[in-house]
Amino acid sequence: MNEEYDVIVLGTGLTECILSGIMSVKGKKVLHMDRNSYYGGESASITPLEDLYKRFSMPGSPPESMGKGRDWNVDLIPKFLMANGQLVRMLLITQVTRYLDFKVIEGSFVYKKGSIYKVPSTETEALASSLMGLFEKRRFRKFLVYVANFDENDPKTMEGVDPKKSTMRDVYKKFDLGQDVVDFTGHALALYRTDEYLDLPCVDTIHRIKLYSESLARYGKSPYLYPLYGLGELPQGFARLSAIYGGTYMLNKPIEEIVVENGKVVGVKSEGEIARCKQLICDPSYLMERAKKVGQVIRLICIMNHPIKNTSDANSCQIIIPQNQVNRKHDIYVCMISYAHNVAAQGKYVAIISTTVETNDPEKEVKPALDLLEPIEQKFVSISDLHEPTDMGTDSQVFISRTYDATTHFETTCDDIKDIYRRMTGTEFDFAEMERKQNDIFGDAADQ
Ligand SMILES: *[C@@H]1O[C@H](CO)[C@@H](O)[C@H](O)[C@H]1NC(C)=O
């Protein structure tokens, strides 16, 4: 490792692995190291189940009722992929899809006054939903048709709404939508975490609702996908990609020092040797002094032997509890997957609750979600700090990723990846351009 690299990457979380893959494909010489003996860092999938018990310092080993430990792959950070979202585009561009098998999540639900309802996002579903009264359904249906037809280049479709000036609050008012409908539209369709979007220009929200509807239209049951054997497959897929392009991977490497000269990174010291580099990418845990804490997330991994009530026995689903419904400032999310995804023993379900911490009794904050899951066989609780970089890397050429937030999809993670890409290269990450070039780049790789 006494060599010179273009980029050294520390940590094998998804963000780091995607960036490492993209940089390798672009012809950069990449060295990728992790202090752990496994891939994925904070976003690992833990297997066997015994390791999950150890990680959470549970007394004893898993009871016999949990089946074979090897059948479990439990995500520490639960997230789904939007079928038409940015991560799927990145997987397709880089052809990492060839290492993965996906299943569609069976349902997406939203919480209202103590009960859960299927999220309606098509006209037909809106009319059939018991979430709204008759008149409200008609108004919501009109709104969905309006959003589907909305085209920024065709003023006729906007009906007097200015995409850059009219707020989303104005648009909801135009369709006379009530508070509950506004709640599930903003939080379960547009996937906002807070209500700040209401007073911003409506165009982003309209795009987000379109993304949801178009993703849903692709496979029918929900807009979400999930990889068999757990999310840990994603960083590993990108690691394989990087390796095809000559990237070097090393696990189990203690990082002794990040070497900086005249304010700029020049290398990384591990086991007494220094590997030199021009740029460094790492997760905040490798360079705490250049990151700051911006909040906390609580996650509860819950193992059950039954599906969630009122989900038509779905073997996988998402439930969003909009902040307003439970008097909070942040939504609570539930992601559930099961043996059907090769992440649990036969007949077992894994539901993971997550939200941004608001009080000093975070476990009490997630009670509305826990109530939906009872009875629970085993529960694993974690509270982790959220970090973001204080050093944007302009001078130091050190690029630090953000901690994974409480959301249950990858859109914010992809925003971080694009942001780091822009700061590293000085150019925007252009999906369309990458997609055009895809055949040129991968024509060669296919031969190898
Ligand atoms: C489940 O459905 C029943 C019957 O429709 C309803 O009374 C109950 O409130 C629902 N519970 C939840 C948690 O959705």
Image: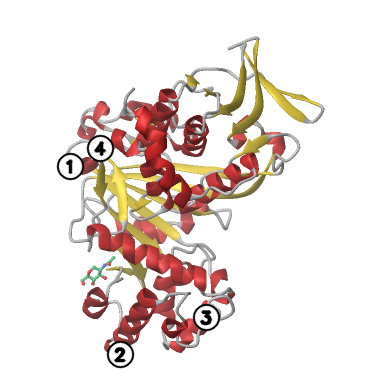
Q: What type is the residue that disc 2 sits on?
A: Phe
Q: Name above or below for residue 290 compared with residue 112.
A: above
- Residue sitting nearer the eye, 320 or 17: 17
Sequence-earlier tag: 3 or 4: 3
Q: Are marks 3 and 1 in contact (CB under 8 Å)?
A: no
Residue at (20% x, 34% y) in the render: 65
Disc 1 designates what residue? 347
Mark in front: 3 vs 2: 3
Disc 3 designates what residue? 169
SS state under label 1: loop
SS state under label 3: helix
Task: Tell me if residue 348 can be seen.
Answer: no
Disc 2 designates what residue? 135
- Residue sitting nearer the eye, 183 or 216: 216
Q: What type is the residue that disc 3 sits on?
A: Arg
Residue at (45% x, 37% y) in the render: 43
